[in-house]
Image (tube, coloured by chain):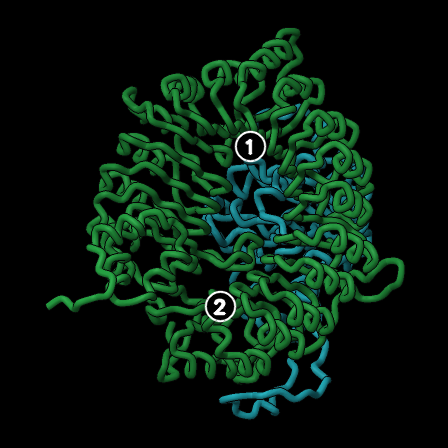
Chain colours: A cyan, B green
C-alpha cells in the first residue's frame, strides 16, 4: 500500500513563501493566517479517498473474475525484447521500491496523440508499419523484475486476455510452481496520473485511459 | 423622429462601408462609435469569434448579431491538451447548435477548438443549415464516424471538412461513401486524425476525382504510399497535401510513379503527414521542393542526413515542423538553405527519456536565429540552454512574435553558469517588442517575471511551469503586462496575494489557469464573490474543496470573464461561487 502512495505523489514539492513584500492590496482581507500546505501531504490523503483498495480488490464489471490473483512461480524474464529500454534507467531500475516520480502529469507539454505516434516510432521504427494508426503502447513493470516490457493494448480485448498474456510474458516457464503461490495485483496509471487497481471500469474505458501498468506483489 | 445629423449617410451606405471591415477587433471598435453605428454594425456582422464559449451565452450572441453566417468557438483551456483538464469538464457545443439552428438558418461556417462535439450535434448541423459550407473541428472530441456520415450526406454544398487533431470514435470505415455523387464542391478535406479502418479508399478517390476545386487534402496514416500517386494524379491542382504512411513494399515502379505524380502538382506549396518514412522515397518530392513554403516532418523518423538533404532542396521554405532528429547539424544546414524561414517547431523524439538521444542543443536554435532573419515563431524542445544563447537569439531575432521554449527537465539551470535563465528570457522580452506569445521553462526566479512585467507590453499569452519564488512573480506579470489575455500556470509557488491584489486585471483578460499552485479555497471564494463578471472555477477530482479548511490550496483553478454568469453544465468535480458566496456545483 505504501508503495502505491509514494507513486501517487507526482507533483514536485512547492517551496515555502518566505519573502515579505508590500504592495497595494485593494479589497483584500487579511490572509496572514494562511499556511503553506505541503503538496505531497495533500496528495496522499486525497488519493486514498479516491480509491478504496479493499473495495476494488477482485471487483470487476467485466467478464473477468480472477484478475488480482495472478498465480505463477515468480521467475523473472531475462531478456527484454527491446534494447532501447535499457537506456531509460529511470524506468528500468532493479530497486524493489522503484518509484517513477520523474513522470509528472502533462509534462513535457506535448499533445497526447503526438506522444503516441512518437513513442511508437522510437521503439518500433525498425519494424515495417502495418498501417495501424491507433496502437496504444503501454509500459508494463512487475515489482521485483528489473526489466520492463512494452505491450500494445490493442492486441487485447478483455482483462482476462491481458493478464494471461502478462503471466506468459513475465515467467520463464508457463507451469505454475504449486508450492510457491504468489498473489499479485495489476495496477494502472490513468490519464490523470493516478494509480488505480485494474478491473473496475469496463475494458473499453480502461484502454482509453491507461498510460502504464504495474504488477504489485501482495504478500498475504 | 430622426435627429438631424451633420453628416447623414443612409444606413445602407454605412452598411456597405462596414462590409469592407472584416476583422472582429475593428468591427468592435466601429460598434462603439455611437448608437446608430452600433445598430447598423450589429445587423450586418456576418462573422463572430468567441474565444471562450462560456464567456457569453448563445442567446446573447444571437440577440446582438441576428444575421451571422460564420461562427468560431473555443472551449477547454489550453492545458487540456496536456491532460490537465479532467474529462467531462465541459465545452459542449450542442447548446450552441440548438440555438443557432433556430436563429441562423443560413449559417455557413462553424469552427470549433477544444470542444466536445457529439454525433447529435453533427446531425443537427447537417439538418439545420441549408447552405452549410465549412466545418472545422480543431482538437475536438466526442463524435464518431456516424456524425461525419451525417455531415457528408446532409451538407450539399460542403466546401471544407477539417478534423485536425480531433479524436474520432471509429465505428465504420464507410462514412465517406455518404458524400453523394452530386457533391463536387469540396475545397478542403483534412482527415489526418482518423485511425486505420475509417476510410474507404475507393470512395475517397471518387470524391477527389469529382471535386475540381480541391485545394487541400490531408490523408490519414492508413493510406500507404502506393495509393498516393493515384490521388495526386486525380488532383494535380492541390496546394496543400498530407500524405499517409510514407512507406510501402519496395517495388521498382513506386518511386518513378510517385515522382511523376508530384511533378504534375504545379501548385503544391505545403506538405505534411510522412508517417513511417522510408528515406528511399523522399527524392520523389524533389520536383515540388523548390516551391514548398510549408513542410511538416514532425511524424517522420528520418535522421539528420536525410532531413538535411530534403531541406536543402527547399529554398522557399517558410514553415518547418520537425523532430529533434534534425539535430544541431541539421538546423545549421536549415539556416543556410532557408533564408525565408518564419516559423520553426522542433519536437522531441523521446520526451520521457532521461538521457538525450540526439545531439540537439541550444546551438541549433542559435544557428537558425543567425541565419534566418525573418524568423518570427519558434517552438523548441531541448534539454539544455544558456543565458548567453538566449541573449544572442534575442538580439538576432527582434521580430519574434511567438517564442516557446521547453527545456524538458523542469528547473534546469544554465548549464555553463548554473544560474537561472532569468536574464536570457529577459533579453527575449526586452528585444522582441512585438512578442505576443511566450512559454517559459528552466530554472527561473521572480526576476524573470519582473523583466516580463517591465518589457512584454504586447504579450497576450504566457505559459509558466515550475518557475518563480513567490507571489511577487505573479504580481509583476499581472500588473505589468498590459496586453495580457491568457495566463496559464502550473506548479508555481503563486498564491492568494497576487491574485487578490490584481483581481480587476482578471476582468481584462480572457482567462487564468493555475494548477498545483498555492491559491487557497478561501481566496477563490472571495474572488468569486467580489468579482461579478468573473467565473471562478475550482477543479478537484479527489474531494470537495469545502471539506477542507479554507486555507488549503486548491488543486486547479480556472478563472475567466463572463457576462452570462456561472455555467449550468458543471460536472461534480467543478465548484464555482456566485455573488452571494454560494458554492454552485
Marks 1 and 2: which is nearer the front? 2
Question: Percent position (x, y) of residue A142?
Answer: 71, 49
Nearest the eye: B337 or B584: B337
Query: In the picture, residue B582 is in which quadrant?
Result: bottom left
Question: Percent position (x, y) of residue A198?
Answer: 56, 52
Give me the chain letter of mark 1.
Answer: A
Query: In the picture, residue B375 is in which quadrant?
Result: top right
Give me the chain letter of mark 2.
Answer: B
- Residue at 71%, 26% (x, y): give it: B310
Q: Is B73 situated above or below B465?
A: above
Looking at the rendered structure, the secondary structure element under dot 1 is loop
Q: How many marks?
A: 2
Q: Residue tagged by mark 2? A: B509
Q: Residue tagged by mark 1? A: A133
Question: Percent position (x, y) of residue A217?
Answer: 69, 55
Taking the image as drawn, is residue B566 in sight? yes
Q: Is B4 situated above or below B435?
A: below
Instruction: Please indicate whether residue B130 sits to the left or right of residue B234 in the image.
Output: left
Identify the residue at the far top of this view.
Answer: B252
Amino acid at each position: 500500500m505504501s508503495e502505491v502512495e509514494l507513486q501517487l505523489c507526482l507533483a514536485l514539492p512547492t517551496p515555502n513563501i518566505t519573502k515579505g513584500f508590500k504592495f497595494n492590496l485593494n479589497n483584500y482581507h487579511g490572509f496572514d493566517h494562511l499556511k503553506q500546505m505541503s503538496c505531497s501531504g495533500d496528495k496522499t490523503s486525497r488519493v486514498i479517498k479516491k480509491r478504496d483498495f479493499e473495495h476494488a480488490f477482485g471487483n470487476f464489471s467485466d467478464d473477468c473474475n480472477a484478475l488480482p490473483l495472478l498465480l505463477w512461480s515468480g521467475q523473472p524474464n531475462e531478456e527484454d525484447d527491446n534494447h532501447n529500454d535499457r537506456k531509460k534507467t529511470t524506468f528500468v531500475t532493479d530497486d524493489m521500491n522503484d518509484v517513477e516520480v520523474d513522470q509528472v502529469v502533462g509534462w513535457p507539454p506535448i499533445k497526447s496523440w503526438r506522444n503516441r505516434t512518437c513513442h511508437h516510432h522510437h521503439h518500433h521504427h525498425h519494424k515495417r508499419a502495418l498501417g495501424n494508426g491507433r496502437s496504444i503502447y503501454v509500459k508494463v513493470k512487475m515489482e521485483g523484475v528489473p526489466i520492463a516490457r512494452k505491450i500494445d493494448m490493442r492486441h487485447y480485448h478483455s482483462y482476462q486476455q491481458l493478464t494471461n498474456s502478462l503471466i506468459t510474458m513475465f515467467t520463464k516457464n508457463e507451469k505454475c510452481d504449486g508450492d510457491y503461490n504468489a498473489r499479485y495485483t495489476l495496477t494502472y496509471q490513468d490519464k490523470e496520473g493516478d494509480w488505480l487497481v485494474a478491473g473496475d471500469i469496463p475494458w473499453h474505458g480502461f484502454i482509453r485511459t491507461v498510460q502504464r501498468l504495474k504488477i504489485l506483489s501482495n504478500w498475504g | 423622429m430622426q435627429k438631424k445629423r451633420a453628416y447623414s449617410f443612409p444606413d445602407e451606405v454605412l452598411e456597405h462601408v462596414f462590409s469592407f471591415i472584416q476583422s472582429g477587433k475593428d468591427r468592435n471598435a466601429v460598434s462603439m462609435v455611437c448608437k446608430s453605428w452600433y445598430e447598423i454594425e450589429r445587423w450586418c456582422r456576418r462573422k463572430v469569434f468567441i474565444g471562450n464559449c462560456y464567456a457569453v451565452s448563445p442567446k446573447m450572441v444571437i440577440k446582438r448579431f441576428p444575421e451571422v453566417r460564420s461562427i468560431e468557438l473555443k472551449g477547454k483551456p489550453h492545458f487540456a491538451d496536456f491532460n490537465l483538464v479532467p474529462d467531462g469538464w465541459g465545452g459542449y457545443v450542442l447548446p450552441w447548435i440548438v440555438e443557432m439552428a433556430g436563429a441562423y438558418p443560413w449559417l455557413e461556417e462553424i469552427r470549433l477548438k477544444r470542444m466536445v462535439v457529439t454525433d447529435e450535434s453533427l446531425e443537427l448541423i447537417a439538418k439545420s443549415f441549408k447552405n452549410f459550407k465549412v466545418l472545422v473541428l480543431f482538437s475536438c472530441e466526442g463524435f464518431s464516424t456516424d456524425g461525419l456520415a451525417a455531415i457528408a450526406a446532409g451538407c450539399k454544398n460542403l466546401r471544407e471538412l477539417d478534423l485536425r487533431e480531433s479524436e474520432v470514435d471509429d465505428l465504420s470505415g464507410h462514412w465517406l461513401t455518404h458524400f453523394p455523387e452530386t457533391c463536387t464542391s469540396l475545397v478542403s478535406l483534412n482527415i489526418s486524425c482518423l485511425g486505420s479502418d475509417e476510410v474507404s479508399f475507393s470512395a475517397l478517390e471518387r470524391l477527389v476525382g469529382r471535386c475540381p476545386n480541391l485545394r487541400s487534402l490531408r490523408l490519414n496514416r492508413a493510406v500507404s504510399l502506393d495509393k498516393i500517386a493515384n490521388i495526386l494524379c486525380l488532383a494535380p491542382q492541390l496546394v496543400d497535401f498530407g500524405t499517409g504512411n510514407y512507406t510501402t513494399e519496395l517495388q521498382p515502379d513506386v518511386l518513378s510513379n510517385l515522382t511523376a505524380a508530384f511533378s504534375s502538382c504545379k501548385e503544391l506549396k505545403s506538405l505534411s503527414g510522412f508517417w513511417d518514412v522510408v528515406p528511399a522515397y523522399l527524392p520523389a518530392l524533389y520536383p515540388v521542393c523548390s516551391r514548398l513554403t510549408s513542410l511538416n516532418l514532425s511524424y517522420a523518423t528520418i535522421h539528420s542526413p536525410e532531413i538535411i538533404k530534403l531541406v536543402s532542396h527547399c529554398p522557399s521554405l517558410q514553415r518547418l515542423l520537425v523532430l529533434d532528429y534534425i539535430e544541431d547539424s541539421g538546423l545549421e544546414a536549415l539556416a543556410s538553405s532557408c533564408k525565408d524561414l518564419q516559423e520553426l517547431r522542433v519536437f522531441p523524439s523521446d520526451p520521457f527519456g532521461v538521457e538525450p538521444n540526439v545531439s540537439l542543443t541550444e546551438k541549433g536554435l542559435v544557428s537558425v536565429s543567425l541565419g534566418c532573419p525573418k524568423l518570427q515563431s519558434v517552438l523548441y524542445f531541448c534539454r539544455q540552454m544558456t543565458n548567453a544563447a538566449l541573449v544572442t537569439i534575442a538580439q538576432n531575432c527582434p521580430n519574434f512574435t511567438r517564442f516557446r521554449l521547453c527545456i524538458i527537465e523542469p528547473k534546469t539551470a544554465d548549464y555553463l553558469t548554473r544560474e537561472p535563465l532569468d536574464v536570457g528570457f529577459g533579453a527575449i522580452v526586452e528585444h522582441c517588442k512585438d512578442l505576443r506569445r511566450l512559454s517559459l521553462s528552466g530554472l527561473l526566479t521572480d526576476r524573470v517575471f519582473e523583466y516580463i512585467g517591465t518589457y512584454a507590453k504586447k504579450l497576450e499569452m504566457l505559459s509558466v511551469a515550475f518557475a518563480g519564488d513567490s507571489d511577487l512573480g505573479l504580481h509583476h506579470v499581472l500588473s505589468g503586462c498590459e496586453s495580457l489575455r491568457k495566463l496559464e500556470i502550473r506548479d508555481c509557488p503563486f498564491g492568494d496575494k497576487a491574485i487578490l491584489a490584481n483581481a480587476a486585471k482578471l476582468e481584462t483578460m480572457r482567462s487564468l489557469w493555475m494548477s498545483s499552485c498555492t491559491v487557497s479555497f478561501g481566496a477563490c471564494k472571495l474572488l468569486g464573490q467580489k468579482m461579478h463578471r468573473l467565473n471562478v472555477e475550482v477543479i478537484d477530482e479527489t474531494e470537495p474543496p469545502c471539506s477542507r479548511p479554507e486555507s488549503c490550496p486548491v488543486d486547479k483553478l480556472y478563472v475567466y470573464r463572463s457576462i452570462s454568469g456561472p455555467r449550468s453544465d458543471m460536472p461534480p468535480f467543478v465548484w464555482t461561487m456566485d455573488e452571494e458566496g454560494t458554492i454552485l456545483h
